[in-house]
Image (cartoon, rainbow, N blue to C red):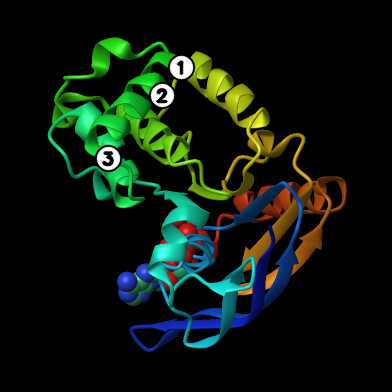
Amino acid sequence: MSVELQAIGVAMAGRTVLDGISARLDEPRVGVVGRNGSGKTTLARVIAGLIAPDAGRARIGGIDMAADRRAALSSVGIIFQNPDHQIIFPTVLEEIAFGLTQQGRRQRDAEAAARAMLDRFGKAHWESAATHGLSQGQKQLLCLMSVLAMQPRVIVMDEPFSGLDIPTRLQLMRYLDGIAAQVVMVTHDPGQLRGFDRILWLDGGRLIADGPPDAVLPRFEAQMRDWGGLDDLAHLAC
Ligand SMILES: Nc1ncnc2c1ncn2[C@@H]1O[C@H](COP(=O)(O)OP(=O)(O)OP(=O)(O)O)[C@@H](O)[C@H]1O
């Protein structure tokens, strides 16, 4: 499975948000880094087919995800930065089962698979819990379980661990190590990209570095420290 980005351009509210992003992603683990507002979330949404780019083409396995929503459902899953934008059902079981019924599974099958996923994370007791009563980190975990249950070939994650405590984060990272899906992860924390194969660094909507972590992350971290050391607030993220 490969994610192909060809000269992607996106404009929002009259501003260029992504500009000429081209990359063919074949690696199992791809990280996306960059400052606030650099376009990472927008790129994640383009890859998942939630935004059709204004210029260029984004395809997974040769299929345009924005044009073919049915193919997108079985090919790519996205975990949003804010779980409140993702969760729509009143109970945990319904939330996980929904994506599976969207994929064409019968309700009973979908619920069985949802229970298996809860079991896998030791959360069988969450089954009837009210989604609105979960903490932010618990909601993030629910979103992860919902997407993992759908077994997409590509999983796009936008800061998926920001609200999780350290044991949950470590458990999830280990779990992700073991899954076959390609992972594209947006993060501000280079520590979460250990073991990744390739890093894309966005700045101002452009791809300014693209390569193995050893080549990209030390430069990225040095640049972030340099900018963080400045007292001129005009340098704060726009
Ligand atoms: N719906 C929208 N309407 C107008 N502008 C938008 C919209 N969504 C994003 N933008 C703008 O696009 C730019 C890139 O936003 P994006 O969310 O992709 O950045 P990001 O790198 O994910 O940022 P962060 O690290 O803060 O999450 C920002 O300047 C943002 O203000």
Asked if the residues shown at circle 3 and circle 1 are in contact, with their CB atoms under 8 angstroms apart, the answer is no
Q: Quadrant of ligand 1?
A: bottom left
Q: Name the residue furthest right.
A: 215
Earlier along the polypeptide chain: callout 2 or callout 3? 3
Residue 120's label in the rendered image is 1
Residue 117's label in the rendered image is 2
Asked if the residues shown at circle 1 and circle 2 are in contact, with their CB atoms under 8 angstroms apart, the answer is yes
Where residue 125 sits: x, y (%)? Answer: 26, 10
Label 1 crowd bin: few (<14), some (14–19), many (20+), radius 10 Å: few
User: Would you say 100 lies left or right of 203 here?
Assistant: left
Q: What element carries label 3?
A: loop
Question: Which quadrant: the N terminus?
Answer: bottom right
User: Would you say 19 lies left or right of 233 here?
Assistant: right
Residue under the image location 72 percent in, 46 percent down? 28
Occupied quadrant, residue 194 = top right
Residue under the image location 34 percent in, 42 percent down? 100
On screen, residue 136 above or below 211: above
Q: Of residues 134 and 123, which is closer to you in this image?
A: 123
Earlier along the polypeptide chain: callout 3 or callout 1? 3
Where residue 156 sits: x, y (%)? Answer: 53, 51
- The amino acid type found where label 1 is placed reads Arg
Q: Of residues 108 and 215, which is closer to you in this image?
A: 108
Q: How far apart are marks 2 and 3 (CA)?
A: 16 Å
On screen, residue 22 above or below 108: below
Q: Mark 3 points at which residue?
A: 106
- The amino acid type found where label 3 is placed reads Arg
- The amino acid type found where label 2 is placed reads Met
Residue 73's label in the rendered image is none
